[in-house]
Amino acid sequence: MPARNLTILGATGTIGVNTLDVVAMHPQRYRVLALTGQNQVERLATQCRQFKPLYAVVTDEARARELRHLLADTETEVLWGERALEEVASLPEVDTVMAAIVGTAGLKPTLAAARAGKRILLANKETLVMAGRFFMQAVRRGGATLLPIDSEHNAVFQCMPEPYSGDLDTHGVRRILLTASGGPFRTRALDTLDRVTPEEAVAHPNWVMGRKISVDSATMMNKGLEVIEAHWLFNARPEQIEVVIHPQSIVHSMVEYRDGSVLAQLSHPDMRTPIAHALAYPDRIEAGVTWLDLTRVGPLSFEAPDLRRFPCLGLAYRALAAGGAAPAVLNAANEVAVQAFLDRRIPYPAIADTLAHALDRLADRPAGELDALVAIDQEARAVAAAYIDAR
């Protein structure tokens, strides 16, 4: 089998680092042609020295100068800017793109990969949440292959019949069950949530993740975004997607069929498992993870989410039902609110308050074309920021 040529968008983040860890275990199967990063220039330079990509991309010219200095004795060409991200995502010699840039910055390069017909390993939630209709159209028109990396959607993918036609009813699927750990505040007294600190919010009990996504896990906004993603990935109606809290994070999601069967994917909470699955699909490869010993795991429990504790989850269902630009508004306002919380400018409960305010103001906007969505994204950020400033 010829080696797959990879571009890794967001190489210095958690997903990117784990992807390179798996790739390093299989040097005959994968060749890294391009790596991109945002702020961690030294880490990106170290990765370039190890994997020797043709290209390395950073966000701005100053970081590009720094990276060129660090890689002066290598053959890696350093590029910068949004256009460069799109270029390395659609290089003719690249067949697989790991889309792991966090936030809306990942939208355009991931779209470029779809239009170029690449095999896309999708770890960027915002691509589907903000522009699901446009992205799925680009996948179909470009002849791209889409494989989900989120542990929940990857689990659903593994439990679906193959080939999946895009119609749950045709395959006898009753519903998709997305599991959630419940985060660090699953049992915390509700009247103490206004005293939550950023340090407490980013201390996830099971997963090692970045600060923003860790806060999203605490609020369960990440699960709300995943509900919207599942709608686009599997053509599922909102009522066909249910969230179940599963504190142990062993069952990563389930698919329930019309005959009463429920298929589940289980593994230790390690992102290298879904990454390895998507990298090698339809084959299976070593991922370097700990084997799951069910005799040592202990009891597995499940419970319904409390929307008083997790109002962001309810807001995500509201945005999905509203359609149009509402999911993009929700996502943009959430990025602003989470950053304000991490900067200690607002208390933890104000994250949900900010999202509700943005939806109240902008949820009825039509989706329009992609440029209109980008404009709405910016407007939602401004509305959220003004609300925070006025508190």
Image: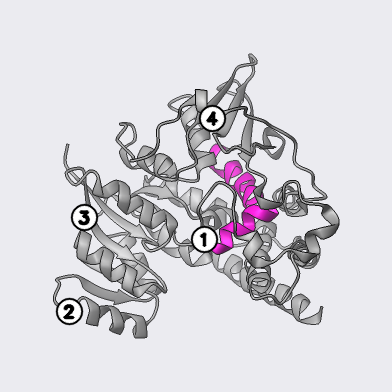
The mark lying in front, picked from 2 and 4, is: 4
Circles 1 and 3: CB atoms closer than 8 Å: no
Q: Residues within 10 Å of mark 3 (few under 14, many from 20)?
A: few
| Residue 260 is one of the magenta-drawn residues | no
Q: Where residue 80 is drawn, which disc sits there?
A: none
Q: Which residue is mark 4?
A: 297
How far is mark 2 from mark 4, CA to CA?
A: 49 Å
Q: Which residue is mark 2?
A: 72
Tag shown at residue 210: 1
Amino acid of disc 4: Val
Amino acid marked by disc 2 = Ala
Q: Position of residue 299 (x, y in %)?
A: 62, 27
On screen, 135 above or below 45?
Answer: above
Where disc 3 sits, the SS reads: loop
- 376 and 306: which one is in front? 306
Q: Earlier in the sequence, mark 2 or mark 4?
A: 2
Q: How many discs appear? A: 4
Q: Please, what is the three-letter code of the amino acid marked with disc 3?
A: Glu
